[in-house]
Image (spheres, helix red, strand yellow):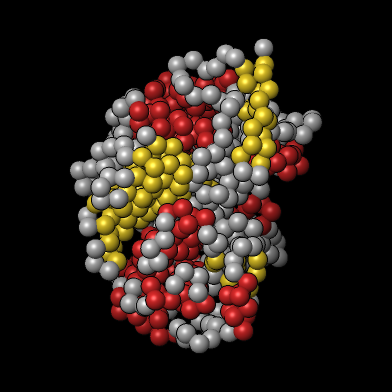
Amino acid sequence: MIQKMIFKTGSVIIAFCLPFCLHAQSDLNPYLYFPQKKIECNRGAVVSAHPLASKVGLEILKKGGNAVDAAIATQLALAVVYPGAGNIGGGGFMVAHLSNGKNLSIDFREKAPDKASRNMYLDANGDAQTNLSQNGHLSAGVPGTIAGLFAELKYAKLSFRRLIQPAIDLAEKGFAISRAEARNLNEAQTVFKKYNTVMPVFVKETPWKAGDTLIQKDLAKTLKLIRDKGAKGFYEGETANLIVYEMKRGNGILTLDDLKNYDAKERDAVTFTYKGNYTIITMPLPASGGVLLPQMMRMVEDQPLKTYGFESVRSVQLMAEVERLAYADRAKYLGDKDFYKVPAKMLMSYPYVNERMKLYDPNKAGNSKDIQAGNIAPESEETTHLNVYDKDGNAVSITTTLNGEYGSSTVVAGAGFLLNNEMDDFSIKPGVPNMYGAVGGEANAIAPGKRMLSSMTPTIVLKDGKPFLVVGTPGGTTITTSVFQTLIDIIEFNMSPEDAVNKPKFHHQWLPDMIFVEKDFPMDVREQLIQMGYTLKQREAIGRTEVIQISPDGKIIAVGDKRGDDTAEGY
């Protein structure tokens, strides 16, 4: 028997069908849920892009898992309930501050296949074929998510079998999709049909609607193989063969050797101080935020931002110019440091950022034709984010991605998961923008085995040595500027985490030479910026920021972004 239940969340009315028999071994109700935007608690919290994934993470915390356990379970649940970005066919980054004081970063970014080549997306005339780098089989890099999960497991307490089971249940028995997911699936029907030789479960003859049950049997089978065989259950054997068969059907180039040889890398986290008592921990290259965030924070460190105030003309102009300077450097210098000698230390140094700030004029708009990357002396969007904090003081910030929404739009037949389209994050031709408008050059050129540059910026802030903020967002090239603005909003403007997440954001990335603003960005500030010489463009939502703030007395405030189904859970 099925009971139809309708309830209202904000201005959105969602209908769900609720079976009387719920999933066993869990208090989770996959047919009746709604976003919770804020929670105040004192033991532990999880914030992610989907209510069910956040609830899965919270259950793990309550059952004795630490923040890493909860993060692993949440990532796996997102791969089921948030197919547009949650994934096992993509990659990402983890930053953590453990209760023993260790700062940790794990790189499970996708890699270029061994058969990849520098000019693989250029036609006979040398023109870039972005349709091939952004869609279908040839756009996929070697997936890193599963290797990343097992690298994270080293710091967890519970068994992987226990952490993956909620995701298996959600895939095998199904869950009710939200209104937003129904809309996204309906909009993607054409590309799913175009880029799949075997139609996936996402393709439906009649339109998807809120409350429809999405069952993913093939994905459940794949998850069970990972549960039973570990990482080899993905990178070798049946699943690996299915990936290669899929490649052959669609002229892709991923091979069994690409999969078998993939490894996640534990790297030294980037740490830097801000105004003495704040220590900021973020992800190193190939995550560009590991250079851009410290660069931008240091550019404004001695500026009177606090007196300018939130989204005043002066503060927006200063921050936009800082973003312009940083992204000019991104285009020229940043890439996989295992393949290219990136002058990261120099780019983050005070002498360099002080020299760059000499180009800043508080009285007029800069010009990206004149403002190029700095001179360096030789020296030795679609994405998803989650935060977890536990009762012992472990903090985890993870951003994962397929790149575009639903990645390559190609589902591995028989395995049930979407492949990424991360090859587009390379510079497929110098000066040609990727899907997010970012340009690049030699540092980010395609090479076999190389990791493409990313904008992901999972970040943790300590205040006086103790966890204070856990922050991150999806959003392509807007990721680092959104994290930058969120930190400034809280640290300089003393804003609540709720306001820092939900107030309108803006973005500048050097090229194109304009400030992007959200629709609720103040009109009077827009007009004054235009008078100063800026070009402004209103766009859709910028990111979906997640924040956990921890007070010295142990109070936890977790906030999920109003821009999506993002949900905060805690206890």
Instruction: Pick out the residue farthest to the right.
Output: 206
Q: Identify the residue shown where x is 38% and y is 73%.
A: 306
Q: Identify the residue shown where x is 24% and y is 63%.
A: 277
Q: Is residue 550 above or below residue 19?
A: below
Q: Identify the residue shown where x is 34% and y is 80%.
A: 354
Viewed as shown, does residue 562 lie left or right of 230?
right
Q: Identify the residue shown where x is 49% and y is 27%.
A: 167
The picture places residue 91, in percent across and down from the top left corner, at 48, 44
Quadrant assignment for the C terminus: top left
Viewed as shown, does residue 245 lie left or right of 490?
right
Number of callouts: 0
Specify the quadrant of the image occupied by residue 535. bottom right
Instruction: Please say whether residue 515 is visible from this viewpoint.
Output: yes
Looking at the picture, tell me which residue is in the foreground, 152 or 27.
27
The picture places residue 476, in percent across and down from the top left corner, at 54, 56
Looking at the picture, tell me which residue is in the foreground, 363 or 422.
363
Quadrant assignment for the N terminus: top right
The picture places residue 372, in percent across and down from the top left corner, at 50, 79
Looking at the picture, tell me which residue is in the foreground, 443 or 493.
493
Instruction: Please say whether residue 448 is visible from this viewpoint.
Output: no
Q: Is residue 412 above or below residue 225?
A: below
The picture places residue 192, in percent across and down from the top left corner, at 71, 39
Q: Is residue 204 above or below residue 484?
A: above
Viewed as shown, does residue 441 lie left or right of 129?
left
Looking at the picture, tell me which residue is in the foreground, 352 or 74.
74
